[in-house]
Image (cartoon, helix red, strand yellow):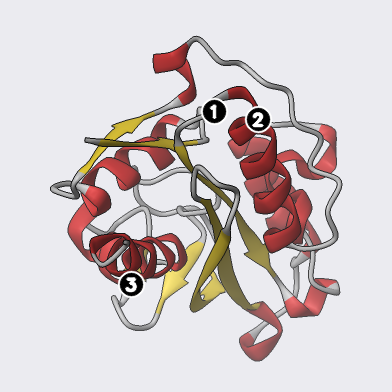
Amino acid sequence: MRRLLFATANAGKQGEVRRLLAGLPFELAFPSDLGLDLDVEESGASFLENARLKARAYAAAAPGFWVAAEDSGLVVPALGGEPGVLSARWGGTRDDAAHNALLLERLEGRRGASRAARYEAAVVLLDPGGAERSFAGRAEGAIAESPVGSGGFGYDPLFYSPELGCTFAQASAADKDRLSHRGRALRALRVWLEAAP
């Protein structure tokens, strides 16, 4: 069976990957399964560039594997696109609660369209020969006035989805997978892998 390394150590993302790629004719692994702990500098100017950097680094460390890597984040137009590619380390920290507090502080006093936001995700797949494919997903929404819900991770307690009528942190895993940015990108990846030569 072909082996697919999905290059993320994030437990929340791993859960989504397991659900959305279940049943593929690939043996799925994560970096910890292979004893890999790479510190890849995410210096790209876009989610796609950062996903590519991670995919290439892990492909070099795991020859013979198909390798997929993902980068994603929150884009708030009223904040000039922030936090964007810095979503996981915005404000100099990797603490979700601190990120959400900073987001509410930056949007304080703003109403309506100025609270519009979107989640974006990019997935890069490298086959064992180094050929690259990329997949993208987006979810439109708005930033809630306060955190709601206990599910999800990252900015999910503040990301209100009009399609769901609740925040991503209130949504079931199945509903989030169906409408989220990463869910859409991973489904596109799955379709490609199902037909991969």
- For label 2, the crowd category at 10 Å Cα-Cα, with few meaning under 14, some 14 to 19 and many 20 or more, is few
* Residue behind mark 1: 63
x and y percentages locating residue 24 in the rendered image: 19, 50
Depth check: give the residue in front, 52 or 160: 52
Q: Residue at x 75, y 31 (%)?
A: 40
Depth check: give the residue in front, 6 or 73: 6
CA distance separating discs 3 and 2:
33 Å
Q: Secondary structure at mark 2?
A: helix
x and y percentages locating residue 86 in the rendered image: 78, 50
Q: Residue at x 50, y 78 (%)?
A: 141
CA distance separating discs 1 and 2:
6 Å
Q: Residue at x 19, y 59 (%)?
A: 174
Q: Secondary structure at mark 1?
A: loop
Mark 1 near mark 2, Cβ–Cβ under 8 Å? yes
The three-letter code of the residue at mark 2 reads Ala
* Residue behind mark 2: 60
Q: Outermost residue toward the top?
A: 35
Q: Would residue 114 appear left or right of 177 to someone viewing this image?
A: right
Closer to the observer: label 3 or label 1?
1
Mark 3 near mark 2, Cβ–Cβ under 8 Å? no
Tell which circle, 3 or 1, labels the residue nearer the N-terminal end: 1
x and y percentages locating residue 61 in the rendered image: 62, 23
- For label 1, the crowd category at 10 Å Cα-Cα, with few meaning under 14, some 14 to 19 and many 20 or more, is few
Report the quarter where the N terminus lies.
Answer: top left
The three-letter code of the residue at mark 1 reads Pro
Q: Which mark is residue 179?
A: 3
Q: Residue at x 49, y 53 (%)?
A: 147
